[in-house]
Image (spheres, rainbow, N blue to C red):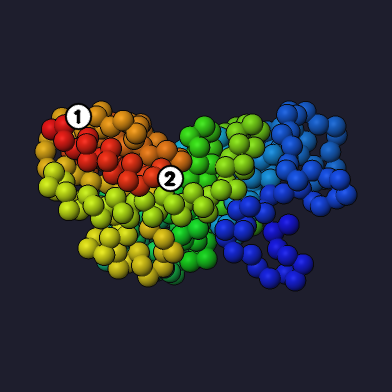
Amino acid sequence: MSTPKDSRPLNPASLVVSAGRPAVTPDGELNPSISLNSTFHAPNASGAGYGRYGNETWSALEEAISALEGGRTLLFGSGMAAISAVFNMLPHGAVITASKNGYSGTMSLLKKLESDGRVDVRYVDVSNTSEVLDSLPGTVLLWLESPTNPALEVADLPTIITAAKKLNCGVGVDNTFATALNQQPLSMGADISMNSVTKFLAGHSDVLLGSLSTSDGALFTRLEDQRKLGGAIAGPFEAWLALRGIRTLAIRLKQSQANALEIATRLSKHPKVSKVRYPGLPSDPHHATAKKFMKGFGAVLSFEIAGSAGDADKVCSASKLISQATSLGGVESLWERRHRWSAESPSIPENLIRLSVGIEDVEDLWADIDSALGYY
């Protein structure tokens, strides 16, 4: 059901609604069922065989994400499980080039692998194209996060990916902040596009899931083996909930992005805010780069208050509508001072607040923010 009868390609806003549906049959189901089987009768050559190898509910969600990303998709039990599967494939001593301001979970894993002598990591400013390109010789895997979490830096993905592939570097992109509605790394030449499905794709703060998409058949098989042998599989209930959530992705993201731009604009003029990080602002240093290839700027922004870390904590605690929580990408707005977590990158300011903007009324959100900023 991913294309109409005339085979005209559907727009992404329609794909999120139509992909991953059961085949059309008379009196058939419109939605996939939840498959609760761990055991199957003896399979043919292409059968699942065992619950760790496949599940019909996973397959439906994988089909929907594949339609957006433009490559085959594997579902994992969490975003970190998906990232771990990629890193686990690398040979001992492999060189990884990665963002110095990436997601703290990824950074913690890289530092652990590095301290164990498993890999050698080169940390770069992904928004500095020259710095990234200089780091590529000898790199086995370039792991790009763009926009970065929580610094909101934007990498020139088309330029960097093209250069990396010329040097035979593997390229993976964490596409969580942007989603495939705003950028498609595989179409730019990346080997892997990763999503924390927990966030925008599922969109309701009620599941933990991750995904890896690739257009390379051999790489797909290697990643699938990592899932089978590593056991980081998804639950069918979680997959079903995420598939239901993805149906509204386009309309949720549209509203959240509009809210984010308006709030970023107002924050940039607020006397108690010293800096706003959001690539949708024309004044943002990454705006021109993002505008070249991104269809939208996402629904996450960060800002630094004109005060201390303690003052930032007071702001986050004072809100009534926005929840102080560590996740992002849901229908509700969430914020937190990122350095309340010891694993956060040391280059992230202590007084930085990350705000994941939801779909609430923007005036209600702004009233809550403006009131909270008055608490220090």
Q: Is residue 254 left or right of 101 when viewed as pictured?
A: right
Q: Quadrant of the N terminus?
A: bottom right
- Of helix, strand and loop, which one carries label 1? helix
Q: Which of the 4 image quarters holds residue 216?
A: bottom right
Viewer can see residue 110? no
Report the residue marked by disc 2: 359
Check the image and name the residue furthest to the right. 26
Query: Could you tell me which secondary element the residue under label 2 belongs to?
Result: loop
Task: Name which residue lies at 22% across and 41% down.
Answer: 370
**Label whose residue precedes the other's in the sequence (1 or 2):** 1
Image position, residue 241 (x, y; %):
61, 36
Residue 274's x, y, as percent? 14, 48
35 left or right, relative to 368: right
Image side of residue 189 versus residue 361, left or right: right
Q: Looking at the picture, how far across and down is residue 254, in whole percent?
A: 46, 55
Q: Nearer the viewer, residue 366 or 124?
A: 366
Kindly report the distance in space between the C-alpha atoms of the residues bearing marks 1 and 2: 24 Å
Could you classify mark 1 by the number of other residues whose Cα lies within 10 Å: few (under 14), some (14-19), or many (20 or more)?
Answer: some
Q: Residue at x 79, y 51 (%)?
A: 23
Please state which of the two labelled residues, at mark 1 or mark 2, is closer to the viewer.
2
| Residue at x 67%, y 53% (from the top left corner) | 19
Q: Position of residue 318 (x, y in %)?
A: 24, 29
Q: Amino acid at mark 1?
A: Lys
Residue at 54%, 37% in the rendered image: 209
Amino acid beneath label 2: Ile
Residue 263 visible to the viewer = yes
> Mark 1 sits on what residue?
314
| Camera-nearest residue between 353 and 92 | 353
